[in-house]
Amino acid sequence: MELTSGLTRRQVLGIIGKTAGVAAMYQAMTALGYAGESTEAATRFALHGAPKDTSILILGAGIAGMTAAYELKKAGYSVKILEYREKAGGRCWTLRGGDTFTELGGATQKCEFDPGLYFNPGPWRLPYNHYGILHYAKTFGVALEPFIQVNYNAYVHSNKAFGGKPVRYREVQADYQGYMAELLAKSINQGALDQEMTLQEREMVIASLKSWGALDDNYHYGKTISAAWRRGFEVNAGGGLMPPEAASQPLARRELIESAFWKRIITGQLVEFQSSIFQPVGGMDMIAQAFARQLPGTIRYNAKVTNIHQDERGVSVQYTDTVNGQALTEQADYLVCTIPASILAQIPMNVGAPMQAAIHSLPYGASSKVGLQFKRRFWEQDDFIYGGISYTDLPIRSISYPSTDYGHPGKGVLLGGYTWEGPNSYEFTAMTPAQRVQKAVEYGAQIHPQYKTEFDNGVAVGWHRVPWTQGCYGQWGDDEHLREQHYKNLCDIDGRIVLAGEHCSHIPAWQEGAVLSAQDAISRLHAKIVAQQ
Amino acid sequence: MNPLFTYAKRATTATLLAGGLLTAAAQAADEPPMTLSGSKIAAQSGATIYQSICQACHQADAQGAQGAGFYPALAGNMKLAAADFPVYVVLNGQNGMPPLRGLLDDAQIAEVVNYVRSHFGNHYQDQVTAEQVAAKR
């Protein structure tokens, strides 16, 4: 695109974004060769010029529904939300001492954490590049703090490697990098890559490998001080007459490779987990609460939607007040529906066959989380682990230490298990809450023996037992065919109805997906409404 | 009833024996085994597979559950009359229910379908075999 006026690309995009919305802006950005930062536009999102007396009903007061409500209200629409739960947030949810949670099947847990301690059963991280959700958190004054994703002093564990003894993350990181550098240097020095690189290039690579892998002058990775600067010392440098520092023995190469522990050092390198990454101070639902404060009198709680109908005059939604059983109806000109497809598939709604097929074709993924309170923060006091994640191949998969309140002398809550897909997610969900907690303690004790004496109490959530979602997230999965066949039909406006939520995004299970989906859906709906005036 | 399914009479002696041993082991532990490696559920018997996966939603008594939506009861469910329907649903999922073809092998699917169709007030006599499940993949 040739820009002939004096406008910068950013100004042009701003104009397009304001007049036509984010979807149009994204297309313009692509045309301007600017798509690399496309989702950054979420921070400048705004709609303008709602036609007078136009009402939009929103189903669901989760992140998608509240994003839609907040922005549509600002644009001048008359907005109301119907929410199944007794409070706002949906999957943006935190459990604290005194909270109760009744899951499908009827089991009720009462959280017995100490004051100030909490557990996020759903989303718990805010990557720096999730511009949309961070934008609202900042706009609403939600306090953020760093979430420790990578902790070099946390553990990597398997009962099938190193005698079942947990290994420090820094040892895995340094040793794997060191050995790979050594092997590559060796193959270059043996002439294996002579065809691949010029002499000059080979010399540069050899030099870089020595530095990158902490190799010695013979291009060997081993028990050296330079390696110890990466993996940790056998004896730390001290003061006065304390013994001098001493190098440590790297893990055996073959065992390290066979352990597959190297898989664990990749996670933190993914863009979704790279520093900086944040969490709201006090629990993820601080974001939900902040959104809800922006929407006074807008949200009707305890509303179970039973029927959705549209015709040429508007939309009509029947719902039941779950407290008194009363059957009620809400009417509006248009509808933004953020009810998860897992639930929506069971609610009669007169939309066309393509959207209906899409709603009925999306499976919901399995996941479980266990929050455990301990009598003291032994991971800090005994193991010197401050925040971050230990990885294991046991069914709990990982243990995540609180990224807050370091050094606090009282009790502490950690994430004692987090399963994502796979057999263990189903198995944990299929257990009673007490069994989930018991199993998490049993397995965690293999990494931290302190569990046996320090465990206090716990809560556990299996997402298929959560009454307002029946599953964790829209599982488009690796089956590109599923998305190809149904995704557009799920997102397209059908008459007066548009769907939104993480399931209508390319970022499933993340709150950012909910925000971007909502912004995109209401942009298109707004454009349609304005065009019909 | 679907003619594609030939109804094997009760399991052979060999599978009965193996099933019996597994059931005894599971009962001794009083809970289904937990999967410690691989992508397939460790449980092998119909009862323990049900307890490892199905009861997460359909519940221990197979009565289903009610929230914003619902999970259908499998107890006394007429849709189980033709065995190929539950086989299809377990393999491919339905609505929000995820496909379980990756979590269970053919024999496990046959086991759990046979279990559900002969428990919780369901009294279907015919059995599905692993070969019949394989043909539906």
Image (tube, coloured by chain):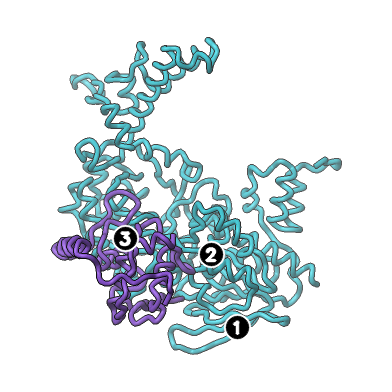
Residue B14 at x, y percent in the picture:
20, 61
Q: Do the numbered discs 1 and 3 sit on residues whose CB atoms are within 8 Å?
A: no
Element class at badge 3: helix
Q: Is residue A410 above or below residue A74?
A: above
Q: Which residue is mark 2?
A: A291
Q: Is residue A389 above or below residue A500?
A: above
Residue at position x 42%, y 42% from top? Answer: A267
Q: Do the numbered discs 3 and 2 sit on residues whose CB atoms are within 8 Å?
A: no
Residue at position x 43%, y 19% from top? Answer: A209
Q: Chain of mark 2?
A: A
Q: Comparing marks 2 and 1, which lies closer to the viewer?
A: 1
Tell me which label, 2 or 1, sits earlier in the chain. Answer: 2
**Camera-nearest residue between A281 and A41:** A41
User: Mark 3 packing: few (<14 Cα in 10 Å), some, or many (20+)?
Assistant: some
The chain assigned the colour purple in the figure is: B
Residue type at mark 1 is Glu
Q: Which residue is mark 1?
A: A330
Q: Which residue is mark 3?
A: B107
Quadrant holding the N terminus of chain A: top right
Element class at badge 1: strand
